[in-house]
Image: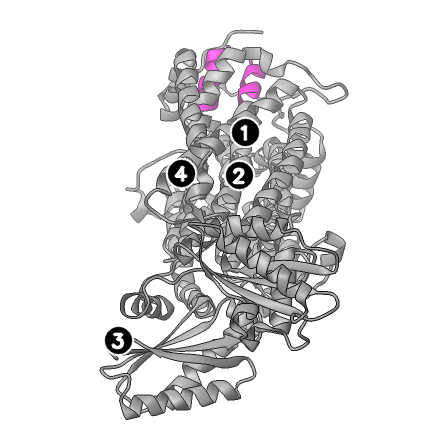
Amino acid sequence: MARRSSGSAQRSFTARVARFSARHRWYIIAAWAVLVGAAAVLAFDIRDVLTTNDRLDPNTESERARTLIEERLRGPELPREFILLRADEGAVDDPAFAALAGRLLAEVRALDGTVVAAVSYHETANEMLVSTDRRTALIPVTLAGSVDDARETAGPLVALVEGFDTPPGFEALITGQGSIGLTVTEISERDLRRGEGIGLPIAMLILLAVFGAAAAAGIPVVVALIAIVTALGGAFLIGQGFELSFFVVNMITAIGLAVGIDYSLFIVQRFREERLRGFIIADAITRAGATANRAVLFSGGAVVIGLLGLLLIPSSMYRSLGLGAIMVALAAVLASLTLLPAMLSVLGDRVDALRIPFIPRMKLHDRNGGGGLWSLIVRAVMRRPLISLAVASGLLLAATVPAFTLRSGVAGVSTLPEDNDRRLAFELLQEEFSAGLVSPVEIVVDAPDATSPDVTASIAALTASLAADAVLAPAGVAVNEASDLALVSALLTVDPRSAGAHDAVRRLRNDYIPAAFAGADATVLVAGPTAGDVDFFDVIALYTPIVFSSVLGLSFVLLLLVFRSIVVPLKAIAMNLLSVGAAYGIVVLVFQHGIGNELLGFRRSETIEAWLPLFLFAVMFGLSMDYHVFLLSRIRERYGITGGNRESVMFGVRSTGAIITGAALIMVAVFGGTAIGDLVPLQQAGFGLGVAVILDATIIRSVIVPASMAVLGSANWYLPRWLEWLPELRIEGDLDPGSETAK
């Protein structure tokens, strides 16, 4: 192979970083080994810093009410669990039932440091602890610690109940916020392992098909795993000072596999391409650094901009997801820019070792188009660009229509698998007692004198309204010692996370409280998990335009600087909104309307997770920009060499088509692995991301991008004179046009 100079490619910052990493490969590899080793040690204990709770802005009504209760009435709320002991035949008054309940109660109370209090019907004769058919006894258990720690605290109690030796004809079940949270975490972790077990092998098969060599296919997977471990270690450190949702692990894994593999795939492929052009190994790495690495840097910036929108929302869950995804994206970019060149320097041409039979070897794309599927597609599209643009845009707009029927909600216990013990216990509690015991609605009355006649009368009127409601039922009134705070408790007769429960809280806030406390000297606030859900919906509604405008604005600025065109960013934003909108519509169609959900193995849900639309927008906007930057970087690079718009577009689509398709299929495999789990929120998220990626890599990149660029011609690169002062970032790098080979 002829030795060729890399020319001016070394002037690029990313080229200099790549060349430095290649020259000092063993130092770079050693530094990454130390970093990953330390991160792995930290990541091993990451579960200790995760929570199933979602903390909102302290200024929301439910958070203000919770603070008042803790400060002026009872202190931090203690977590409660509910054990249900049921007999197939007989009654709770039978001696055998009483003896079994006594033994269970004794074992529960023996959990020192875990259980604060536990009561039973057989000790108190409280008929409220017995079902109407007298075959089920309820044992309320108060745990130590706070509600935030309920998931960990409930663990020993859940293990005791599940392992309790019940004779034939008896059954012991447990439910509560802590045990439900623990179950959700366990299912999430199981789904994560299952998803990895499916997504990784499929991703490896796709990489083998793209590269045709096992060595080259293995590199992106290694880089992705390194990014994931690094981000998990970082998440553990952040978790020492901030609450992180348990979903952060799923987020880091899914996004890490997706972007880590994608970035490495583009760089390795460009390195192999430069070697085919005749450049020596060091110069091929440098030229890849000046082009593919540079595109990865800006693509990573686009992903981070999209994810920054999640950090704007005052919700610990959103911020956890945003932080996790940003950390793993940055780790993937850093590993791609430094570790990957070092690995390529060590491997050299051995990157093509272990070739796969029957897969054609890589070849350069010629100037005039050649053959191949992507050449045929782009030629057909650019032959009739207006028709292609209209048909493709129409399809995406049609897919968007169902999104206008979207109903937001929160997955409750009823969305757990039907045979799950926690769901069975919850349904039994709801049927025989009240599901509201798990998450009661708490109405805080803050008044100078909560025992004054007008406040007392208002509380009585409110209690009467609660008693007349089909979903809410009054459960008692408590007043603090200072008599300046009263707490009215109400139980829900439905799943506290259901739409019916949310509507009940809205009735309470909008109708019952204003009517009952008209003229009274009191401030009334509603607390509890259900009220927190309603506040969460309101926060999302408030911040949605803020997130959209921030992400769109920053993305516009980044693309304006990168491509020095005002048309390119406007088109990119429009196209990405099309793919995201279509993904919304298809998710609503499948999950909410139940069209094709059984065929795909998904459970139908009456609502779409409230956090999902903004999450999908932020993640998919970033990932869509990923592909857009990679495609346009090749088009812009070719345009700088030839000056021909049509030929540059055809070359860009042709040269990146297989790579972008392979990258998209890998993302679909990763997100599909997430979607096949048992948790409805993760099913919706994984499916939505997978659909958006497919639409983006097919209809958007293969049809709408080339068609729109053919229609606009040289206007694609229009920059008003009054913006020519902007800095020139040049995503296409600093390649010497004369060194570009074109057969």
- Where residue 151 sits in the image (x, y, percent)? 48, 52
Q: Work out whether mark 3 precedes mark 1 in sequence or the reverse, and give the earlier one.
A: 1
Res. 574 in view? no
Which residue is found at the position 59% from the left and 42% from the top? Answer: 192
State the residue position of label 2. 253
Q: Secondary structure at mark 3?
A: loop
C-beta proximity under 8 Å, tags 3 and 1: no
Looking at the picture, the colour scheme in use is one colour
Furthest residue toward top = 2
Task: Tell me the kind of residue under disc 4.
Answer: Phe
Q: Secondary structure at mark 4?
A: helix
Task: Tell me the kind of residue under disc 2.
Answer: Thr
C-beta proximity under 8 Å, tags 3 and 2: no
Using the image as rendered, state which of residue 425 and residue 729 is in the foreground: 425
For the N terminus, the quadrant is: top right
In the image, the segment drawn in magenta is 270-290
Within 10 Å of disc 3 (Cα), the crowding (few <14, some 14-19, many 20+) is few
Using the image as rendered, state which of residue 183 and residue 40 is in the foreground: 183
Using the image as rendered, state which of residue 463 and residue 520 is in the foreground: 463
Considering the whole magenta stretch, tell me its main secondary structure. Answer: helix
Using the image as rendered, state which of residue 328 and residue 345 is in the foreground: 328
Q: Work out whether mark 2 precedes mark 4 in sequence or the reverse, and give the earlier one.
A: 4
State the residue position of label 4. 236
State the residue position of label 1. 266
